[in-house]
Amino acid sequence: MFTTKTVEILSHVEVFAGLTRDDLKVISKDCQRIRFSEGETLIEKGKSSAAFYILTKGKVKVILPERIEGGKERRVSEITLNILNEGDCFGEYSLIEKKPGSASVVGLEPGEVLKLEKRNFEDLMTNDRIGKTVYRNLLRILIRRLRKKEEELDLVLIAG
């Protein structure tokens, strides 16, 4: 549902950097505001994530849960892969790969997301300018996350 406030929020989100205000209006008309509570699972590992999310309030953690497929337990408890803050996005892996979620996303505190359903996300990506811009921005975001994880692993290996 289009609102000026939603367009304003989207204008500060990295994944939409470089898009015009008119592009953001098109995107905003398909966004739903969803509130979540602390501890609420927004995406569950192994289940299909049928949406792209933009975190507008609060924090979430991206985790590998304590239990793995088949009900087996990990040797260690849940593994935190990332902490996401306002302006960050998630859910893109499932939408791009068309596979179930590779991790769970859980609220660290009460918050709110803008949710873009799979069909709406896919429709937007068929628009040459919007699709190219969003995919280029997603690639930059994912590379930065990967580099950060590599640095963290290097620190662990050096310290260990």
Image: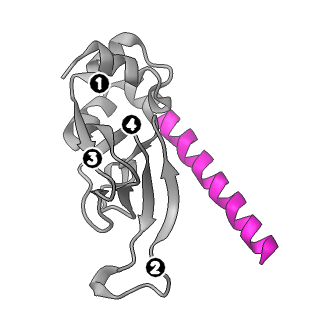
Q: Earlier in the sequence, mark 3 or mark 4?
A: 3
User: Is the residue 121 above or below the residue 75 in the image?
Assistant: above
Q: CA distance from mark 3 to mark 2?
A: 23 Å
Q: Quadrant of residue 58?
A: top left
What colour scheme has been applied to the protein in the rendered image? Answer: one colour
> Tag 1: Cα neighbours inside 10 Å, few (<14), some, or many (≥20)?
many
Q: CA distance from mark 1 to mark 4?
A: 19 Å
Disc 1 element? helix
Disc 2 element? loop
Region in magenta: 135-160
For the residues labelled 3 and 4, say whether their Cβ atoms are less than 8 Å apart. no
Q: Residue at x 37, y 57 (%)?
A: 105
Q: CA distance from mark 2 to mark 4?
A: 27 Å
Left or right: residue 145 versus residue 3 is: right
Check disc 3 and give the amino acid type: Phe
Check disc 2 and give the amino acid type: Ser
Q: Which residue is mark 1?
A: 27
Q: Nearer the viewer, residue 77 or 115?
A: 77
Magenta span main SS? helix
Disc assigned to residue 36: 3
Q: Which residue is mark 4?
A: 57
Residue 108 at what x, y percent from top left?
Answer: 41, 54
Left or right: residue 98 versus residue 145 is: left
Residue 98 at what x, y percent from top left?
Answer: 30, 55
Disc assigned to residue 77: 2
Check disc 4 and give the amino acid type: Lys
